[in-house]
């Protein structure tokens, strides 16, 4: 029997979210579990999780817990999936979480061939400022580089004793040395806040990163001497490609929007995106849009329209045929121009204040 695999380092697409929930034992996400859910929680872009009640209880009972995510400094730009991760980190920051951001420079070296020096430069010049520009509160965030964290390295070796090669291959599909080292380091990163104080933690990621959380939970169950909390996971859907594929990919540059990107290029891509409009104006006025096929509306739903009432109004205008696909795209272009402008300014501002960030000082 062939194992079902989610590959966090691969490019394979996961097309059936309901099937993913069933196959990998995830919990269906219900936005009512958390107080004042954010936009992507309310709109079912966040679709699944693991052990969410313990985080909900921590929020409602004002108990200590943490949120943690990593920066992979292998590229010079980021994507909308990163934006959603930051939005969820921001949500938990605003609801009392102790917040940690690690720079996965060792993983970038072992799986992407990026030197530690280049990884540091990219993280400080772009990735961390971009996270701040997207909403991360730097005053509430603790940062560190994997390569400087001796405690994480030591625990990674200890944790590696708890996993067999067969088990690793069952989770990841293959077990080359670089992947093994990267994954065991991620396990230690995920548990790092608990090295000093035992508390629940949540890791908001795209569902392709679930193997790391599953591996960590397996390690915790076997590393009984420390009694770590099992880490919780929170998973968002992909932002679809503008041509209708389930996920934006740099392999299709005309259907993928990078962050940041020149606004003229972005507007051209939006105007050429797959539309839910009908073939003729008369048909569109009569039958209305096929919104489920419209990639620009999906982009607006996930990222560009914050107010639910405004989105609902756009939905009904477009669905009824009163709004054309061209008019919808003009609204999206206008909102994207504002978003990109704010992002670029935010990155520039955050870059100037990079020295003020709270990095862990290791001995």
Image: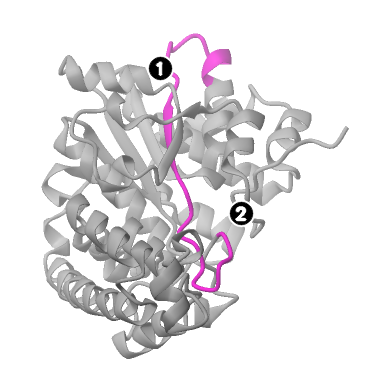
Tell me if residue 249 comes above or below residue 24 in the rendering: below
Image quadrant occupied by the C terminus = top left
Q: Residue 243 carries which label?
A: none
* Left or right of 340 in this view: 222: right
> Would you say the residues marked 2 and 1 are in contact, meaning their CB atoms lie under 8 Å apart?
no
Q: Where is residue 314 in the image (x, y as percent from the top left)?
A: 26, 63
On whether residue 64 falls in the magenta region, the answer is no
User: Residue 246's quadrant in the figure?
Assistant: bottom right
Q: Position of residue 238 (x, y in %)?
A: 48, 54
* Left or right of 112 in this view: 287: left
Q: Where is residue 96 in the image (x, y as percent from the top left)?
A: 16, 30
* Left or right of 275 in this view: 285: left
* Left or right of 24 in this view: 129: left
Q: Give the range drawn in magenta.
A: 220-246
Badge 1 density bin: few <14, some 14–19, many ≥20, Cα 10 Å: some
Which residue was labeled with disc 1?
Answer: 229
Q: Which mark is residue 9?
A: 2
């Amino acid at each position: 029997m062939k194992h079902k695999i989610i590959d966090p380092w691969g490019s394979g697409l996961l097309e059936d979210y309901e099937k993913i929930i069933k196959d990998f034992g995830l919990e269906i996400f219900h936005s009512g579990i958390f107080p004042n859910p954010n936009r992507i929680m309310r709109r079912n872009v966040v679709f699944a999780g693991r052990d969410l009640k313990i985080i909900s209880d921590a929020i409602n009972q004002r108990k200590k817990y943490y949120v943690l995510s990593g920066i992979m400094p292998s590229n010079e730009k980021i994507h909308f999936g990163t934006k959603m991760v930051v939005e969820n980190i921001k949500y938990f920051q605003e609801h009392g979480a102790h917040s940690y951001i690690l720079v996965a420079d060792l993983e970038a070296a072992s799986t992407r061939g990026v030197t530690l020096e280049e990884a540091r430069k990219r993280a400080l010049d772009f990735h961390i400022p971009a996270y701040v520009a997207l909403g991360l509160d730097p005053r509430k965030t603790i940062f560190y580089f994997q390569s400087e964290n001796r405690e994480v390295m030591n625990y990674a070796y200890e944790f590696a004793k708890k996993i067999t090669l067969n088990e690793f291959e069952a989770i990841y599909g293959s077990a080359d040395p670089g992947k093994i080292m990267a994954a065991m380091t991620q396990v230690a990163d995920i548990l790092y806040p608990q090295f000093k104080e035992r508390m629940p933690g949540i890791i908001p990621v795209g569902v392709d990163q679930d193997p790391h959380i599953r591996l960590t939970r397996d390690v915790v169950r076997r590393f009984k001497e420390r009694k770590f909390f099992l880490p919780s996971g929170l998973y968002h859907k992909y932002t679809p490609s503008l041509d209708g594929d389930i996920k934006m990919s740099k392999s299709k540059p005309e259907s993928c929007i990078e962050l940041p990107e020149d606004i003229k290029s972005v507007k051209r891509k939006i105007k050429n995106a797959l539309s839910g409009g009908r073939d003729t104006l008369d048909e569109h006025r009569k039958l209305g849009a096929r919104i489920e096929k419209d990639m620009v509306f999906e982009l607006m739903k996930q990222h560009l329209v914050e107010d639910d009432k405004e989105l609902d109004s756009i939905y009904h205008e477009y669905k009824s045929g009163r709004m054309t696909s061209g008019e919808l795209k003009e609204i999206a272009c206008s909102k994207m121009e504002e978003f990109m402008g704010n992002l670029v300014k935010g990155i520039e501002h955050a870059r100037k204040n990079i020295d003020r960030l709270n990095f862990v000082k290791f001995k």
